[in-house]
Image: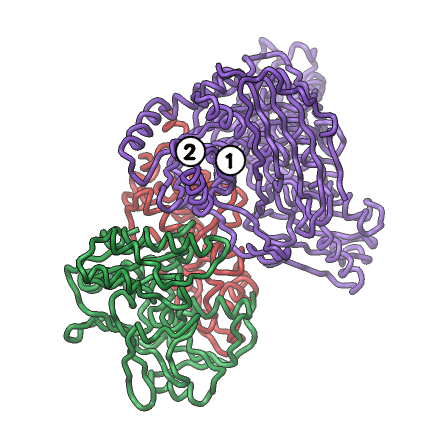
Amino acid sequence: MAASFGDAGQFDPALFDGCEAVVTRTIENQRVAPAPMETRAAAAAWGKDPGKDPGKDGRLTAWIPNQGAQGTRAVMASMLGIDPALVRIITPDVGGAFGAKFGADPEHGLVCWVARQLGRPARWAETRAENMVAMTHGRAQRQTITIGGRRDGTVLAYRLEILQDSGAYPKFGAILPSLTILMTPGPYAFPRAEAAAVSVVTNTTPVGAYRGAGRPEATAAVERAIDLFAAEIGMDPADVRRKNLLPAFTEPHTTAFGAVYDSGDYTTALDRALAAAGYQDLREEQAKRRANGGAVQLGIGLASYVEITGGGSEAGRPQENATVEVHPDGSATILTGTSPHGQGHSTVWAMLASEELGIPVGKITVKWGDTDLIPQGGGTGGSRSLQQGGAAVQQASQELLEEARQRAAGELEANAADLVFDVGSSAFTVAGDPDASVPLARLAETERLFVRSVFSAPGATFPFGAHVAVVEVDTETGKVVLRRMVTVDDAGTLVNPLLAEGQRHGGIAQGAAQAFLEEVVYDADGNPLTTTFADYPFLSATEVPSFELADMATPTTYNPLGAKGIGEAGTIGATPAVQNAVVDAVSHLGVRHIDMPTSPQRVWRALNESRDAR
Amino acid sequence: MIPAPFEYAVAESAEHALELLAESGDDAKLLAGGHSLLPMMKLRLAVPSVLIDIGPLTELAYIRTDGDDLVIGATTRHADVAGSERVRSEAPLLAYSAAQVGDPQIRHRGTIGGSLAHADPAADLPMALTALGGSVELMSPSGIRTVSADDFFAGYFETSLEPGELLSAVRVPRQPGADWGYQKFVRRANDWAIVGVAAVSGRVALANMGPTPVRAWAAEQALADGAGPAEAAELAADGTEPGEDIHADRAFRQHLARVLTRRALEHQRG
Amino acid sequence: MKVRLTVNGQDRSDDVEPRLLLVHYLRQHLGLRAANVGCDTTSCGACTVLLNGKSVKSCTVLTVQATGQDVTTAEGLAAEGDLHPVQRAFRAEHGLQCGFCTPGMVMAATGLLAENPHPTEKEVRAGLEGNFCRCTGYHNIVRAVLTAADAMASPSRADSGSPAIPTSTESAQ
């Protein structure tokens, strides 16, 4: 079984005509496991007696850690063959997801089915070994990259051919390459580029979304290609990037692959990352170590990236809803269609509402993840939540103020236009008459004061950045130590810098881990070999340094916050930066490429091969 | 995740433990820190019908000197071996080795006796004991017999412990001031060694290069003949037939053994 | 098998199967759900508690082994409802996201600081090598532990002084 995107049969055989240098290579973007700290779990109960059972009137109530209760409900209803109105999904605390807890899996459906068969509540939690085999895996692309251009560093053409392993049941995994293809040229102004993919099924765990879902693969491919090209023509990879990056733009830019980048300044991102890393000093240190010929060599790896966030929700368009309600006691409640599991929406949504309404953050409650309370929502994933869900909260708050203004005008017997809202005191006052004022909360006394608003974005946004990885490679043992990660991750306006940093940190760690540590391994008979945390090299605090994050914020016009998505950016930049760094560490010994993860054995083999070739 | 059912008895003394062992037959296991045994029981790779808990026995937890030897009771925790001033000054390689086992939580529970009796060839302490030329004391109703490290590890997770015997103590020669080196090659901090090397006083022991800790005889001979670290280390893998796994094939393991032996002989610790 | 242990300062008596893991006793018998089960191989540390003040992985301790001993879980850290300095630091430094690893991480950190009150960054990372986190990349966890160390060293300076490592944006200037 296979699905294809693009058509390799349509590739232009003359694509690389006129190129002074052409490099081609087949590389692996290996299969990894999302491995959230919480494995999957579910509890289900059906009810017939109102007031007695959690479900009412024969409805199903299911507690399932997921990335969007509304999406889960749709899948569950379909699995069980019942009307979604009979399903209530409650999302409890979720111990990490990273793309692998969207919707519902057969196991979740089974738990609900068992509960119905037995007429009793049922509960299930998988073991880690089960999780390593039954939760969808990530990545798993074999990529043939071809890049050509002039010896002055100008790239003229780039081709990407993908073989996607979708595992046993195609599901989302088969579609991932279409996202990869969309981002084929990355941040570069390649005159000619083409891409095609074939997805195949294999007798392995199904592949699904994993932090970046198809886009890290595109960046990893093109960043490896740029470095291969740089090595071929003997040019500094930073200079090759500068030569080919799209110049800064503030108006939307449509690529040949149909992506509409909203705003970008890729060269500044690269320059800032290089400056923060002290690039020249690093190259000097590298040169010194090479001259000394010691065992431990220094590698510097770069990655420039652009990625797509907020591309669409369950409604098909990039949008999200929020309901904001002010209570007579001066508190407020926000209902959001997002589904946070560590991203801090409780904090930020409350901040956004507080800034509009003047209600203290501590008096604002944020709720999500109960389909009875919030029947619609796109959940949290694809780095969509702030730019759509947060924008919706802000919008709903503003609309609520407009509704409140009308009520205040009635209360104060004044024209609405003559009223001033003072955020500090959370009250409307008649302009010029400070004694004529009414607190916002009072306007909720006779009639509920709430607004449900849907924020629609004109399209997806495109955060971007540059990563610099510094590694030490022990050329005698192949061991890689990650010394520094310096990143620029520009996701537009930072509404909450501390939370944004947290997302970058987590993404960087996962991205780096793929480059030099993690892989899911099957033996030749298809038996999984990495089914425990003892075998699967899940990274610990000793394998990564503290990260160095540089600032850059190029706002988008696609939402009033100016924010793009940041959740996946760190992962996308870190993987190729670290892989490039490892290759760079031993490039003077003739090594041009090492597949991920750059395990000690892979590094050692690469060194042997290039030594034998010399 | 959940062990199979078993009967559980707490030993009130080492002798009592021996009695319980004799009563319970072949299917009984001693429990000290449980950090070699319980993980296997949770995966049901081990299904003893009886566990005899010697963990609480203070009579088996001690660090003392006895003539030229340091003697360490079998239920002494790794953290205590690692942190002992006495061990650090008189057999620093052993203290260092104990500090490499697993992670802090594991070191708070795991014991030196338990680890040695478990005999994982990739583990730290079997290799360390072999390099140090230490020995174990095996207690039975007929008394205590001492078995050298070279003779104790018989095969993959197999020792020369007889049924009804209890590993009661560990002996290592006191060698304050002896130069030593230790190399534990891992991809992640709390992994078992892909290859390990411990070297002290002309002895070189390798971890994960065979079904037991392995002496690098050829390298030792070269050292005795006056070779320097690099020259001797070239022979470190001679005679070894290491296994293969997802981390390393045979050739890579043997290569690592040579490189890491050179470093250990240069007294590097890592 | 009868067991008698002290959990968070309270004496508990129970009759349990010998094979009952301490983590399951805490979670299912005592309703103390902070300690989580994240793996099957004593790798991840999400189940970490203090046993007689020392950090241990409660998934690899039999309840019967803990009889006569003192167990502290994350629920028992806070004195009189106030947060423990380690908890306070995790919150202030954004040292958690999904929270699943957090109780184990906090208990491991508390045990670490009891043994080494002034760790370097390197020592903190090594001290937490038995605790996995998928969300934070460890950066803010390390900051939290260093912040807690400062706060516990001089309680009057609890809210001042920066940790030994800079915020990630500071160091990139």
| Image quadrant occupied by the N terminus of chain A | top right
Question: Mark 2 — residue?
Answer: A590
Mark 2 surroundings: few (<14), some (14-19) or many (≥20) residues within 10 A? some
The location of residue B231, given as percent across then percent down, is 25, 53
Mark 1 surroundings: few (<14), some (14-19) or many (≥20) residues within 10 A? many
B48 lies left or right of A558? left
Chain C colour as displayed? red
Question: Mark 1 — residue?
Answer: A575
Of badges 1 and 2, the one in the foreground is 2
Q: Judge whether A139 appears above or below A307 on screen.
A: below
Chain B colour as displayed? green
The chain letter for the residue carrying disc 2 is A
Instruction: Say what amino acid the circle numbered 2 marks.
Output: Gly
The location of residue B182, given as percent across then percent down, is 28, 56
Q: Judge whether C162 appears above or below B95 on screen.
A: above
Instruction: Say what amino acid the circle numbered 1 marks.
Output: Thr
C8 lies left or right of A75? left
The location of residue B73, given as percent across then percent down, is 28, 74
